[in-house]
Structures are given as C-alpha cells and as structure tokens.
Image (cartoon, grey):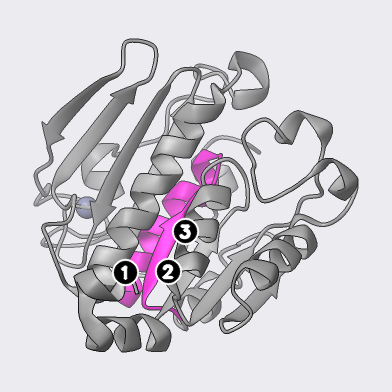
C-alpha cells in the first residue's frame, strides 16, 4: 500500500507483468534483486555460475553464512521466494556467453548488469544494443562505484569506453577490495532505475554517468554523448552480431 500510493494500482500491475534479468548475484545483483522482488516485479531472471564464498558475505546480502558452498542462484531464489512468493524466478546456473546471451536477454524488459568483469560488460552492452533493450549498468571497486542507464538509441557503454583497459591495468575486486556499502548503493540505484524504466516515470539516468565515492560521500555526474562512430550503436556499426569477448578483452 505504501508503494501503490506512489505508483497507483495500474503501476503495480505494470510491475507484475514486467520482467528484469539480473546478471550476477554478487554485490550489485544482491540489493538490486531484493528490492525488485520486494517491489513486485513479476518475473526476475537470475544468472550466475558461481558458488557462495565467505569473502562474498560482507556485500552480497542475498547470501548467508549457511549458504557457503551453495550455488548463488539457489540461495538467491530461496531468499527472494521467502520475501515475495508471488513473483516468478527463473534461474540460470551458467555464465552469460556469446552463445546464450541473445536467447536469454530477449525474454526480459530490462537488463540489470551487476557483472564484475569486462568481457561480460561488453557482452551485455552489445546484446542489449542488438536487441534494443535498456541496460542498467553498474560497477564498483574499492570505495567507488558508477551507474548509468543505456537505452536503445544510445549512448551505450562502448560510447563511454570504446575499448577495455589492457589486462592487468585495472585491479579486480579480489585485488583491490570493495567497500560493502559502495556495492549496496550502486545496486540500489540500479534497482531504482530499473523500476522507473518499467513504470516509465521520473527521469532515468540515461545519457548520464553517476560516479559515487563513498569515502568522501560525493556524487558526480558526467554527461554522456553518443559516439556517431561507435562500433555497435553508431551510424555504421561494425558489430552486428556477438563476438568473442574474452579475446576482445585480451583474456586469452
Ligand atoms: Zn555506442
């Protein structure tokens, strides 16, 4: 009732009929999934190929200590089903790849990218551009995070970062650490933006990159512009099908 006061019964029906795919059930996907389930998004897709480790628990709030060693999709489904038994959960215990991405993403209205690596980010971006799906992007490292919404028509993630950084130049979360609430904030903002996209309300974080520094608690916005020469969303796109993203990111 507290939510329907704001979005109306019609808005609640819209959410019930809506679907969101959450890529990665880690520090970003956890808060995003909890809030989207609580808000009553009717169908949540959950994709993750990993198992719960003790080092996950300070930020990956879907999973608990007894879940250590279990598939993240299992602990996530249990937690989300307990929170809202009225929604449908579709779990994929696999990595998102060029082979399965179009088939999986095609089924959802909005994609929330909570992945923690460059090959998956470029894969999600390109698949969303090819399928004309909105991509709610988030990433986090150390005390810092960033969020942006990439909608059909651009700008897209590649307009912002044309190429991935050379392998080894950017630390991973395992190397540099992650402040738990930085991940929480980014995941929550991703849920916020996904709900607004579904409800077609407010102004989304489209064409803007929000940079968050939890150490100083500062929020900075950068205006994003579509790159007319973007290889995937530009005037003459060179990427018209999914590529080998591990190779593109120099990981093999
Ligand atoms: Zn682009």
Left or right for 252, reference 197:
right
Q: Residue at x 32, y 82 (%)?
A: 12
Q: Are marks 1 and 2 in contact (CB under 8 Å)?
A: yes
| Residue nearest the observer in this picture, 53 or 119 | 53
Residue named by callout 3: 35
* Badge 1: residue crowd in 10 Å (few <14, some 14–19, many ≥20): few
- The Cα–Cα distance between marks 1 and 3, rounded to whole angstroms, is 12 Å
**Quadrant of the frame with the N terminus:** bottom left
Q: Circle 3 sits in a helix, a strand or a loop, which is it? A: helix
Q: Is residue 4 magenta?
A: no
* Cβ of mark 3 under 8 A from ligand 1: no
Question: Where does the magenta region start and end?
Answer: 108-132
Q: Quadrant of residue 126?
A: bottom left
Kindly identify the residue that appears in the image at 45 percent across and 28 percent down.
182
Sequence-first disc among 1 and 3: 1
Q: Which comes sooner in the sequence, label 1 or label 2? A: 1
Residue 39, disc:
2
Identity of the residue drawn at 34% across and 46% down:
189
- Asked if disc 2 and disc 3 are in contact, CB closer than 8 Å, the reply is yes
Picture coordinates of residue 183, whole percent (x, y): 49, 34
Residue 219 pos. (x, y %): 22, 25
């Amino acid at each position: 009732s507290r939510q329907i006061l704001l979005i109306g019964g019609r808005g609640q029906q819209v959410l019930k009929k809506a679907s969101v795919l959450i890529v990665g059930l880690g520090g970003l996907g956890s808060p995003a999934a909890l809030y989207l389930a609580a808000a009553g998004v009717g169908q949540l897709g959950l994709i993750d190929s990993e198992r719960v480790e003790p080092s996950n628990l300070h930020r990956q709030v879907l999973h608990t200590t007894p879940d250590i060693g279990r598939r993240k999709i299992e602990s996530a489904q249990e937690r989300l089903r307990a929170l809202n038994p009225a929604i449908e959960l579709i779990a994929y215990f696999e990595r998102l790849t060029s082979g399965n991405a179009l088939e999986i993403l095609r089924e959802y209205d909005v994609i929330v990218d909570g992945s923690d690596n460059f090959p998956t980010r470029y894969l999600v971006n390109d698949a969303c551009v090819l399928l004309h799906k909105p991509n709610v992007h988030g990433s986090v490292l150390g005390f810092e995070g960033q969020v942006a919404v990439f909608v059909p028509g651009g700008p897209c993630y590649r307009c912002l970062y044309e190429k991935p950084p050379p392998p080894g130049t950017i630390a991973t979360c395992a190397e540099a650490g992650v402040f738990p609430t930085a991940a929480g904030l980014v995941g929550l903002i991703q849920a916020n933006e996904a709900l607004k996209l579904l409800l077609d309300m407010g102004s989304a974080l489209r064409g803007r990159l929000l940079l968050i520094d939890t150490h100083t608690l500062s929020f900075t916005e950068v205006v994003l512009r579509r790159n007319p020469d973007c290889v995937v969303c530009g005037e003459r796109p060179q990427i018209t099908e999914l590529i080998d993203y591990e190779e593109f990111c120099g990981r093999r």
